[in-house]
Amino acid sequence: FIADPLALTLTDAPAKLGADIAVGSMQRFGVSMGFGGPHAAYCAVSDKLTRLMPGRLVGQSIDTKGRPGYRLALQTREQHIRRDKATSNICTAQALLANMATAYAIWHGPAGLQAIAGRIHSLADRLAAGLRAAGVSVLGTSRFDTVTAEVKGKAAAIAAAAEKTGRLLRVIDADRVSVAFDETSTEADLEAIAGLFGAKPGAEGGSMPAKPRGKEFLTQPVFHDNHSETEMMRFLRRLADKDLALDRAMIPLGSCTMKLNAAAEMMPVSWPSVANLHPFAPAGHSAGYRKMAGDLEAWLSEITGFDAVSLQPNAGSQGEYAGLLTIRAYHRARGEGHRTVCLIPSSAHGTNPASAAMAGMTVVVVRCLDDGNIDMDDMRAKANEHSKNLAALMFTYPSTHGVYEEGARHLCALIHEHGGQVYFDGANLNALVGLARPGDIGADVCHMNLHKTFCIPHGGGGPGVGPIGVRAHLKPYLPGHVAEGSAHAVAAAPFGSASILPITWMYIRMMGGSGLKQATETAIVSANYVATRLAPHYPLLYKGRSDRIAHECILDTRVLKESAGITVDDIAKRLIDYGFHAPTMSFPVAGTLMVEPTESEPKRELDRFCEAMIAIAGEAAKVAKGEWPLADNPLVNAPH
């Protein structure tokens, strides 16, 4: 069941109509069109389908003192557990946009939402009535906000006349034109549009389908208590005070690259010229957007060494999916559609096998050695075994273990010898920009996380952008869009989450080549500094040549479990008391912490984090010596 959430404030809930699943876009709840995104979507299911949902479900629980609290009740998208058997490959979520839509609902409340929806419906209903009265054929008898008229060869002319008055109508074909209203539409808009058809607005007739919704929805107090600007401001402030964001402290999440999102980069996102453009507006209205996208494609191609880039994927996981579909299309075009085997190292992030499965590939896992590197003997054996059906290799560089694996060029050459393509996972591109290029290493496809390496903020899970770069032979198979002359797409809008692309454009433009290289070098130095300071207290699980790492390190906190019974969970919670968000926990190795400081953090903050970790090791030593009881100490009782 596909349903507009604003329309649902006026009509029956899908569940009452017998639906098992309902989906739709939350853009209607106060989120700018943004030339296509980013926008949150919703997916609602019946109880019996809950455990099959992709994403995370938040539930209410009780803490040790009996107080109510919220927690992640279910994470069905755990690809790092289920891998190629995961329910989806989704990793990035549109958390920011979901919060924006929620704030819109909180501010307006159910009565306000119904008033907005009712006014929109009235405009559409009155246009339909007026057109019929003027003898214009109107398609359909039920509607919420959209009127489609049959005008026999006049659609383009009517749309052109509307454009001259500053209004854009949708031309479906030569005979049909469509008009959609929203909360910004006015009585003047209604009269002007009706006049284009030689009509006047008619009387409201009530064309909403099903039964009226009534008042019993959004009954929680939060949707009724915050309807003055002062109340709403304080409510949002209270929520912000519960978060630990980069404006308060370092967030050392390994594999996440939580770097500074500078205000200058963020400012253009709110400009009306960026925020308010429809993704299917005529090309003449989007020249600036297209110029910016062209710049980004060229810059990202130069940075990564590829011949072409698609900006359409909305996340790194979607970039993986798009890249693998590109590889599959390439093989099919060569009459080798039987090539469906994808080799993936056991150390890979779980999205890799999940994406491969979604793309219709068969995943074959390649072993890794004790030092974290790919077992090249096993790689050669698997490549030989599956040579006739080999489609691709997916590998991450630097590796998921935070080291630069040697022999990456030889690895790419091996796969090419067997007719496969190399998919380069760009999750760790923050350790390469300005120093090395995936295309030069031998990769055929690579996704780039603009929400990591290139500064789009992604706290809470998103939004993200995951462009893919490809070599020239794969360019014809990149994602396109029906509106741009192609049937192959991975997103509903031609340029994906276009309205946040200015952030990356600004970042690259302000940094320049030398600045980008310096950022990479600083990220590497910072990670090695942290690793060196903490090594006497927490063994470094993986190291490269000269005992150095790339941009992140894995600390083996299992030593505290062995000596004092203190778990990685205890350490993570105790870090909250020291004012830090915990590093990535138990990935890629259970019982460890993966730390990525990024180039954004000053030495003072790095030292503060190191001192907190060293202090925690000292506290664990007191437990080990019996000075503090294991069942009752500051570590196991954290956070305080």
Image: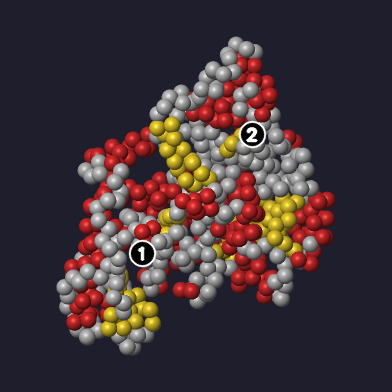
Circles 1 and 2: CB atoms closer than 8 Å = no
Quarter of the rendering occupied by the N terminus: bottom left
**Amino acid type, residue under disc 1 in the picture:** Leu
Q: Residues within 10 Å of mark 2 (few under 14, many from 20)?
A: many
Find numbered disc 1 in the image and state the secondary structure of the residue it sits on. loop
> Could you tell me which residue is drawn at 52 percent across and 55 percent down?
315
Query: Relative to residue 394, is residue 246 drawn left or right?
Result: left
> Could you tell me which residue is drawn at 53 percent across and 68 percent down?
489
**Amino acid type, residue under disc 2 in the picture:** Thr
Question: In this view of the protein, can residue 297 be seen by the observer?
Answer: yes
* Residue 490 rendering spot, x and y as whole percentages: 53, 65
* Residue 83 rendering spot, x and y as whole percentages: 64, 51
> Could you tell me which residue is drawn at 75 percent across and 45 percent down?
368
Which of the 4 quarters of the picture holds residue 8?
A: bottom left
Residue position for label 2: 592
- Residue lying furthest bottom in this view? 153
Q: Is residue 257 above or below residue 42?
A: above
